[in-house]
Amino acid sequence: MANADTGIDFVAGDTNSALQLTIKDRDTNSAVDLTGGSVTLYWKIVGNDGEKSGPRQSASMTLTTPASGICTYTWTANDLDPPSEVIGEPKAYRAICEAVFTNGSGNTLTTLNTIELNIRSRFTA
């Protein structure tokens, strides 16, 4: 499983690889309790020219260990395939992780974090 502490590398067309994230409080750097919350992952290709290309995709992440802020998304078919209108190898996908949760005071909070996903071509035989 990949972890989003640094840039994350995947293979174009990859399936069954997982993106695992730990949602943390920016002030304290401690994990956020996601119990009863939700996390949505949004991603979009950034083409060779640095411009965003193709449609934005989204999926709900699984709260793997909610009390520790850990969530996971397993890539499915076509998630990491560039659309036909993108010319050349995409250099990156830009992803945003949106976590909605209730804090200890009973307030509902939303946090957004940007993640860079680097996608390389498959090796051919």
Image (tube, helix red, strand yellow):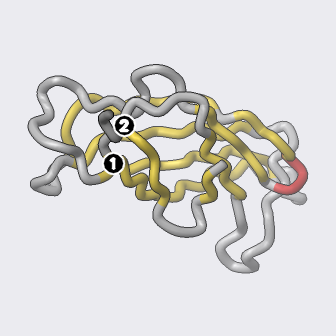
Quarter of image, res 45: top left
In this view, 27 is above or below 113: below
* Label 1 Cα crowd, 10 Å radius (few <14 / some 14-19 / many 20+): some
Residue 77 is left or right of residue 46, and the answer is right
Instruction: Say whether disc 2 or disc 1 marks the residue closer to the N-terminus.
Output: 2
Q: Position of residue 66 (x, y in %)?
A: 85, 46
Residue 29 is left or right of residue 4, and the answer is right
Residue 81 is left or right of residue 49, and the answer is right
Q: Position of residue 2 (x, y in %)?
A: 61, 53
In this view, 85 is above or below 110: above
Q: Label 1: state its secondary structure.
A: strand
In this view, 55 is above or below 109: above
Which residue does the numbered mark 1 point to in the structure image?
Answer: 120
- Depth order, front residue of 107/25: 25
Which residue corresponds to the image point at 49% horizontal and 58% vertical from the top-left? 8
- Depth order, front residue of 68/18: 18
Is there CB contact under 8 Å for labels 2 and 1? yes
Q: Amino acid at mark 2?
A: Ala
Q: Position of residue 26 (x, y in %)?
A: 65, 73
* Label 2 Cα crowd, 10 Å radius (few <14 / some 14-19 / many 20+): some
Q: Label 2: state its secondary structure.
A: loop
Image quarter (top left, top right, bottom left or bottom right) of the C terminus: top left
- Depth order, front residue of 10/79: 10
Which residue corresponds to the image point at 79% horizontal and 72% vertical from the top-left? 30
Q: Amino acid at mark 1?
A: Arg
Which residue does the numbered mark 2 point to in the structure image?
Answer: 12
Which residue corresponds to the image point at 60% horizontal and 45% vertical from the top-left? 19
Q: Position of residue 25 (x, y in %)?
A: 71, 68
Direction top: furthest residue: 77
